[in-house]
Image (tube, rainbow, N blue to C red):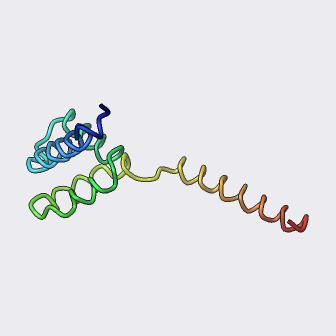
């Protein structure tokens, strides 16, 4: 029996979200380890779980403050923007070359 059949994956995701909600209720009085747990969840969790966090009105302001305080860890860095620019440049070059060859 795999994890999806017995509901373990669903329970794990929900319990993770509930744990992060609990941590956010006491933000900014959270420890560094708790902040790392929140960052890990927001960075690697599903988009649905992150959306469910934003729907919780009791922690909405604290989540907003946490994201503001940790925007560097959660957002695009300069290195990410350079990588994106390189990829887009290569795609544009490939399209141009294919157009030039009549493909």
> Which percent across, then down, holds residue 99?
84, 68
Q: Nearer the viewer, residue 70 or 11?
A: 11
Q: Nearer the viewer, residue 97 or 59?
A: 97
Mark count: 0
Q: Quadrant of the C terminus?
A: bottom right
Examine the rendered structure and indicate whether residue 32 appears above or below residue 86. above
- The residue most toward the right is 101
Residue 95 placement, left or right of 38:
right
Residue drawn 23% across and 37% down?
6
Residue drawn 36% across and 43% down?
44
> Which percent across, then down, holds residue 56?
14, 61
> Which percent across, then down, holds residue 64?
23, 60
Q: Quadrant of the N terminus?
A: top left
Q: Nearer the viewer, residue 44 or 3?
A: 3
Examine the rendered structure and indicate whether residue 8 appears above or below residue 81. above
Residue drawn 8% across and 47% down?
26
> Which percent across, then down, holds residue 70?
30, 49
Residue drawn 59% across and 54% down?
84
Residue 17 placement, left or right of 76:
left
Examine the rendered structure and indicate whether residue 30 appears above or below residue 52. above
- The residue most toward the front is 1
């Amino acid at each position: 029996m795999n994890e999806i059949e017995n509901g373990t994956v669903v329970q794990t995701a929900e319990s993770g979200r509930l744990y992060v909600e609990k941590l956010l209720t006491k933000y900014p009085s959270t420890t560094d380890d708790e902040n790392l747990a929140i960052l890990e969840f927001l960075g690697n969790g599903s988009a649905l779980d992150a959306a469910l966090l934003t729907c919780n009105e009791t922690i909405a302001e604290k989540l907003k403050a946490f994201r503001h305080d940790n925007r560097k860890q959660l957002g695009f860095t300069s290195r990410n923007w350079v990588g994106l620019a390189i990829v887009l440049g290569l795609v544009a070059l490939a399209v141009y070359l294919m157009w030039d060859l009549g493909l």
